[in-house]
Image: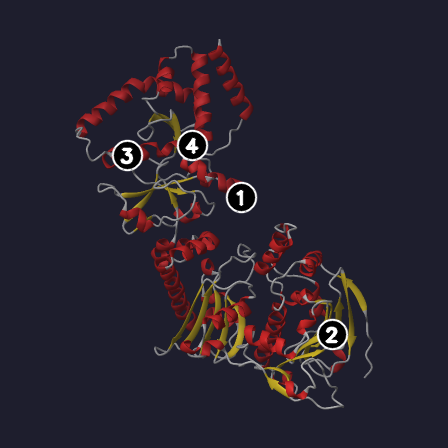
């Protein structure tokens, strides 16, 4: 049957143009990864055929042995990667090769610096898959036909990696995809049988299907190819073609584990850690191979991006990115699960209701948390590296995983007043070990930045009494503490909420009787009663009340809220997100021992009194990281005060 070519030239998606320009011009120190990426794609295509073939065996078209063929032509200067997997139809070619449907693409491209070496490193974090072909090729030709379609539905795609590509219908007798790379000048070292074999052994030795090349002894030399009419070449398998996870751990080298991770994760860097386990018995047989990446992928914070593990049933690939096995806060984990406890015809919809899934999920989560525990305990420097990349993701855990809330909380790291460092190295266990003998609570403060938290006036009494306070300044922290009210029997208490307990905060060597302290407190309240009422009158409904503070030692004023009210930082975050909230009126606390407050107490001029109150109130807002409703008026008041002082 004749084929109408329907050839057309189409433009790449804007993001693809930018990515291709970067790939083509970046300086790669490890160009050979193009072969790993293309073989990995071929393996995925074969896995998809296996899965679809379980319900429709006709897709195999009397060719049931799935393989990948690698050939090269030294004269034409081409390398060809051919598979007999699922293949693509015309629409799928346009979708898969002409666009990037990956979440976070624009965010990734916005981070490019123009420095070729730095940008090449960013590509590694993003992952480019098929487009890695343009690292070594100036033109790439793809011919493909989807399994189940007739030969005249073949498709030919070609591009020089610039702004556009051509696509045409062709006749293709066999299903699957054939990719031909027309090498750039200077890349001829890849036109060598031994070189290609070495790359395959290094990166793709445990791809779960055979990779075939011509036997070297069929050639006159390593780089001289004969035609079929001269001598039909004999094929040989050049990889182990066995699933790595099925082998005994003792027979697998660290290098093999690392290369397998790069294959399944499409990552350029070694993993930080891995765990390979086989569980038998208890009606739940499974093998898991789990990896912790060293670097966060670009799409880590894209909520609509799929994450998860690869699922195999009885060594047969079923589906990719199975999110049901791990909670969202562990979405950075990569790896595979192979089990006999699920049917081969399982689907994503059936997974939702299968009773085996919760048991597998529970076991895998325990395994991952064990990995993190071990890393945190035995390799603190590596855990610090992990925390820098994934700490804010792990902070989602207490809200998402109630059953493991304490285990996750144990892994979380913070900054604190213990060392006033922005580096988050303090654990809750560290904090508890340093607690005062009489201390009953774990104290913390939330702010929009580290400096705002560290310099908060709310910390003054705690610093004076040498009581450690955790400094929360990441946006996720408000969400975290909303679901982590206690740890190891110790309640978490905001230093900006409610009253500070004088009993708990008293120094061990303070012999002042409790009754005497209470009498002093009552006396101060009596002395400042009229001042507090005047302040409330001036500020009106801007505050809930004015009162004397037990937490201030150096600052004149601060703002706090009631114990069960929403904190000011959370209010700001919700407003910034466009949510309507009921505004919480703060409590205006005064330090009765501060000279400014003493001066305010003695001020008889009502106009000056009001000016002072407004200035002090605005200062309190600024000190906690808030924004003034009328900054210009605040500046005018400060300027007026400065002029009066200069007279």
Q: Nearer the viewer, mark 2 or mark 1?
A: 2
Q: Which residue is mark 1?
A: 577
The numbered mark, 4 or 3, whose residue comes first in the sequence reads 3
The numbered mark, 4 or 2, whose residue comes first in the sequence reads 2
Q: Residue at x 36, y 62 (%)?
A: 374
Q: Which residue is mark 3?
A: 465
Examine the image and state in which quarter residue 535 appears.
Answer: top left
Q: Are marks 1 and 3 in contact (CB under 8 Å)?
A: no
Residue 337, labelled with which disc? Answer: none
The numbered mark, 2 or 1, whose residue comes first in the sequence reads 2
Q: Are marks 4 and 3 in contact (CB under 8 Å)?
A: no
Q: CA distance from mark 1 to mark 3?
A: 37 Å
* Foreground of the two, 478 or 452: 452
- Label 3 crowd (10 A; few <14 / some 14-19 / many >=20): few
Q: Is residue 544 above or below residue 123?
A: above
Examine the image and state in which quarter residue 219 appears.
Answer: bottom right
Left or right of 240? Residue 515 is left
Please indicate, yes or no, whether residue 499 appears anywhere in the rendered image: no
Query: Residue 254, percent across and down?
Result: 45, 70
Q: CA distance from mark 3 to mark 2?
A: 76 Å
Which image quadrant: the N terminus? bottom right
The numbered mark, 4 or 1, whose residue comes first in the sequence reads 1
Instruction: Provide the secondary structure element on which disc 4 rests.
Output: loop
Q: Which residue is mark 4?
A: 585
* Foreground of the two, 142 or 425: 425
Count the labels in the image. 4
Q: Which residue is mark 2?
A: 77
- Label 1 crowd (10 A; few <14 / some 14-19 / many >=20): few
């Amino acid at each position: 049957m004749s084929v109408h070519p329907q050839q057309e030239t189409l433009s790449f998606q804007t993001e693809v143009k930018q990515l291709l320009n970067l790939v083509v011009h970046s300086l790669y120190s490890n160009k050979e990864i193009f072969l790993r990426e293309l073989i990995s794609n071929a393996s995925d295509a074969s896995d998809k055929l296996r899965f679809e073939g379980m319900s429709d065996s006709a897709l195999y078209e009397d060719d049931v042995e799935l393989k990948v063929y690698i050939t090269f032509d030294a004269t034409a200067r081409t390398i060809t990667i051919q598979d007999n997997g699922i293949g693509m139809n015309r629409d799928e070619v346009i979708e898969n090769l002409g666009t990037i449907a990956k979440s976070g693409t624009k965010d990734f491209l916005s981070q490019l610096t123009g420095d070729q070496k730095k940008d090449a490193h960013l590509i590694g974090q993003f992952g480019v898959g098929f487009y890695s072909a343009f690292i070594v090729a100036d033109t790439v030709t793809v011919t493909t036909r989807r399994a189940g379609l007739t030969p005249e539905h073949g498709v030919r795609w070609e591009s020089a990696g610039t702004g556009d590509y051509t696509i045409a219908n062709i006749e293709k007798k066999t299903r699957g995809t054939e990719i031909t790379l027309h090498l750039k000048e200077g890349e001829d070292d890849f036109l060598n049988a031994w070189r290609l074999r070495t790359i395959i052994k290094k990166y793709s030795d445990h791809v779960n299907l055979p990779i075939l090349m011509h036997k070297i002894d069929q050639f006159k030399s390593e780089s001289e190819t004969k035609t079929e009419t001269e001598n039909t070449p004999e094929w040989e398998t050049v990889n182990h073609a066995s699933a790595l996870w099925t082998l005994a751990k003792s027979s697998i080298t660290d290098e093999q584990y690392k290369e397998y991770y790069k294959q399944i994760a499409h990552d350029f860097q070694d993993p930080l850690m891995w765990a390979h386990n086989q569980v038998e018995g208890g009606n739940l047989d499974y093998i898991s191979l789990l990896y912790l990446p060293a670097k966060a992928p670009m799409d880590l914070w894209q909520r609509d991006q799929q994450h998860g593990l690869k699922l195999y049933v009885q060594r047969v690939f079923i589906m990719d990115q199975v999110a049901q096995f791990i909670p969202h806060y562990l979405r950075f984990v990569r790896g595979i699960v192979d089990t006999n406890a699920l049917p081969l015809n399982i689907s994503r919809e059936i997974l939702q209701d299968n009773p085996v899934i919760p048991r597998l999920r529970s076991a895998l989560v325990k395994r991952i948390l064990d990995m993190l525990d071990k890393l945190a305990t035995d390799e603190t420097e590596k855990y610090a590296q992990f925390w820098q990349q994934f700490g804010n993701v792990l902070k989602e855990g207490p809200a998402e995983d109630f059953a493991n809330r304490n285990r996750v909380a144990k892994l979380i790291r913070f900054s604190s007043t213990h060392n006033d460092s922005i580096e988050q190295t303090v654990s809750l266990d560290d904090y508890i070990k340093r607690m005062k003998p009489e201390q009953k609570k774990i104290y913390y403060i939330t702010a929009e930045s580290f400096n705002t938290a560290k310099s908060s006036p709310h910390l003054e009494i705690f610093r004076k009494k040498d009581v450690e306070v955790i400094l929360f300044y990441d946006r996720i922290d408000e969400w975290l503490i909303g679901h982590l009210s206690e740890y190891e029997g110790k309640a978490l208490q905001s230093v900006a909420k409610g009253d500070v307990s004088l009993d708990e905060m008293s120094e061990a060597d303070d012999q002042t009787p409790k009754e005497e302290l209470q009498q002093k407190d009552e006396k101060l309240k009596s002395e400042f009663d009229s001042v507090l009422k005047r302040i409330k009158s001036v500020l009106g409904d801007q505050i809930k009340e004015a009162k004397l503070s037990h937490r201030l030692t150096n600052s004149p004023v601060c703002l706090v809220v009631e114990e069960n009210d929403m904190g000011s930082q959370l209010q700001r975050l919700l407003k910034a997100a466009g949510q309507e909230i009921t505004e919480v009126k703060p409590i205006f606390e005064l330090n009765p021992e501060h000279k400014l407050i003493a001066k305010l107490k003695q001020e008889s001029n009502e106009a000056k009194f009001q000016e002072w109150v407004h200035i002090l109130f605005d200062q309190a807002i600024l000190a906690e990281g808030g924004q003034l409703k009328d900054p210009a008026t605040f500046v005018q008041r400060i300027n007026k005060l400065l002029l009066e002082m200069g007279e």
